[in-house]
Image (cartoon, coloured by chain):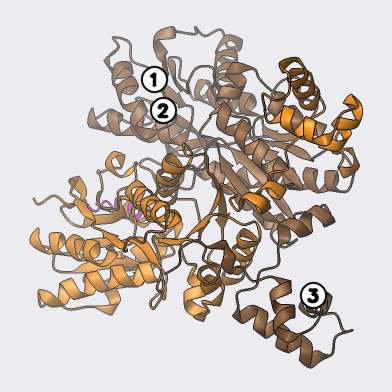
Chain colours: A orange, B brown
């Protein structure tokens, strides 16, 4: 069985000893250099393969100055949005021979800092970064500035911080939330509740601001009793929705910070035999693949998750070619389904 | 703006020149060696920080023989199961100072091979591997055997291949499927359909076998018309479910290969105003967080996804300490909800 013992790693020198030739002959044979005759090349290659010889790409990368590796730092990877962004990145870089190192920070500043240090030390060719919440909260950006100081291409995906000179691709969350709220007003809703995301998180704040500004534009009251906090997960919407339905004056619509909180809200609403959308309309955010198959099918604000990955790839490829494209903000799209139909 | 220019990387020699001291003094100062007086240490550390100096962990790792990095190779990361496994791994290794390199193969043999080569070249301390479907199909395992040849600790998670000597943590998919089918028989169902996963995939086959063997044990017919193929995603269940409901003799239950195909099935069943579970009972697999909030709440076979990550971490840590624990198969648990209640 395999226990770790680095003394058994086979080197070019070991192979040279075995065949009584010079290390440079072995190296040429392994690189398929025609200077070495074919039979010798084959023999050496087969032996190297059999013995588990592995070219040391790290020391190669110190010479070549390219590791063909990119870092991708994300706060989490457990929802449709993140895996679609990753798919977009991978679809561009995998055919080009790049490997993606995916690092998950769980919104932790210190993990984000550690990951950046490690990626820089590993001499990645570039970094995609979606800034962690703690980093925003603490306002420490030195670790990110270190990337720029070392002239490593950096592209923000999904989240950047104010004041950075770096480029990135984000989605217009504010506009998406504004559109969703506007649509609810248009179908006649007047007491529109909001299941918001965690306080202080940029994405929560942008969506909340879009919701609030749309109400204000239409001279509707921004009622604190109708604004409750969730953590983006299904379970976190259960109690807040119960409180909303316990109000003397119930809401006639709920705008959820994402589709998952709407799934939680739907289950509470159904339990009480309240009709969606006739008594309460519902709109989520993300347009995840399950939205259209829920009961009733859920209206939702679509983020172009895969397109974020593709566009971010363009920005990074340009930087690798010493060109700098400017940041992009991708528009959102409101997908209207049964849960917010007018009756 | 940052364009890549490696000439600007600052080295220990540059710092030494700046302070007119030896490189070894700089190195000691940066390593906080008390031989160097505190003021000098601080001055040098601050300057290094300001100039974006980065310790070259790669060359360090060639000396230390440990990169404090682990590779995690997964076929995909877009469902609850995979992100929970990753969370389990991270909760053990992050506090120990290890970084996880997550590599997503999309079930591709050649990507899996490339990732393993790259991880070995980067001298990771160990690898977690969930074998890709193409690798099974092609039966080429040399790239995996290379890990063992180089004595790098290897732990399979979720999927291993027959005949490997390596250890791993898997889930008893067969037993889970058997239990689910048995439960459907116990509540009185006799025409039990199966929305199976892609043919040839181990997880699909194990679950199918559990379903089939349970039917046979109870002297029920294994009816080809009631067994239709999906690809694990919601959309892929729509047409198969429509065909099932178009049969002259409709099924009285559906066992889905995962929760997502059940969500698709539910939406078709509801459209036709067929009652769940009175007319058709439904059971999924995974017990993902949304299962209990669906309409009706979905019975499901629970995989201990996070526990796979934790147990696999134990196996790898033991190997790092030159001990070899044996493979583990974690049991599944049937969670019964409204969608398969007896009436």
Identify the element where label 3 is drawn. Answer: helix
Say whether residue A156 is magenta.
Answer: no
Check residue B252 in the rendering and tell me which mark sits there, or answer none: 1
Mark 3–mark 2 Cα distance, whole angstroms, equals: 73 Å
Q: Locate the N terminus of chain B by quadrant.
A: bottom left
**Residue A229's x, y, as percent?**
39, 70
* The residue stretch that appears in magenta: A268-275
Q: Which residue is mark 2?
A: B281
Q: Nearer the viewer, residue B89 or A19?
A: A19
Image point (74%, 35%), residue name? B168
Say which quarter of the image contains residue B7: bottom right
**In the rendered image of this protein, does residue B261 appear above or below residue A148?**
above
Mark 3–mark 1 Cα distance, whole angstroms, equals: 78 Å
Q: Earlier in the sequence, mark 3 or mark 2?
A: 3
Q: Which residue is mark 3?
A: B23
Identify the element where label 2 is drawn. Answer: strand
**Residue A91's x, y, as percent?**
42, 40
Say which quarter of the image contains residue B324: top right
Say whether residue A272 is magenta.
Answer: yes
Same chain assignment for discs 1 and 2: yes
């Amino acid at each position: 069985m395999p226990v770790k013992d680095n003394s058994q790693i086979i080197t070019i020198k070991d192979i040279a000893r075995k065949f009584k030739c010079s290390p440079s002959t072995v190296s040429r044979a392994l690189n398929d250099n025609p200077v070495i005759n074919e039979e010798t090349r084959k023999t050496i290659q087969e032996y190297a393969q059999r013995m588990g010889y592995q070219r040391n790409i790290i020391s190669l990368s110190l010479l070549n100055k390219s590791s063909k590796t990119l870092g991708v730092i994300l706060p989490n990877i457990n929802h449709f949005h993140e895996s679609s962004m990753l798919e977009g990145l991978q679809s561009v870089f995998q055919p080009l021979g790049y490997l993606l190192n995916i690092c998950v920070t769980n919104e932790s500043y210190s993990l984000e800092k550690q990951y950046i240090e490690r990626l820089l030390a590993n001499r990645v060719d570039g970094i995609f970064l979606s800034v962690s919440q703690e980093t925003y909260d603490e306002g420490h950006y030195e670790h990110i500035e270190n990337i720029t100081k070392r002239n490593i291409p950096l592209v923000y995906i999904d989240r950047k911080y104010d004041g950075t000179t770096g480029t990135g691709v984000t989605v217009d969350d504010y506009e998406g939330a504004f559109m969703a709220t506007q649509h609810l007003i248009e179908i006649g809703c007047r007491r529109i509740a909001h299941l918001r995301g965690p306080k202080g998180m940029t994405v929560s704040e942008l969506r909340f601001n879009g919701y609030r500004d749309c109400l204000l534009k239409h001279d509707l009251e921004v009622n604190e009793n109708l604004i409750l906090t969730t953590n983006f997960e299904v379970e976190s919407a259960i109690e807040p929705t119960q409180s909303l339905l316990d109000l003397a004056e119930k809401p006639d619509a709920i705008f959820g910070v994402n589709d998952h909180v709407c799934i939680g809200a739907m289950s509470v609403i159904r339990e009480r035999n309240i009709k969606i959308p006739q008594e309460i309309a519902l709109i989520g955010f993300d347009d995840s693949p399950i939205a259209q198959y829920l009961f009733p099918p859920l209206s939702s604000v679509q983020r172009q998750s895969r397109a974020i990955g593709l566009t971010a790839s363009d920005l990074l490829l340009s930087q690798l070619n010493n060109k700098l494209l400017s940041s992009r903000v991708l528009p959102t799209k409101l997908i209207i389904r049964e849960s917010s139909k007018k009756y």
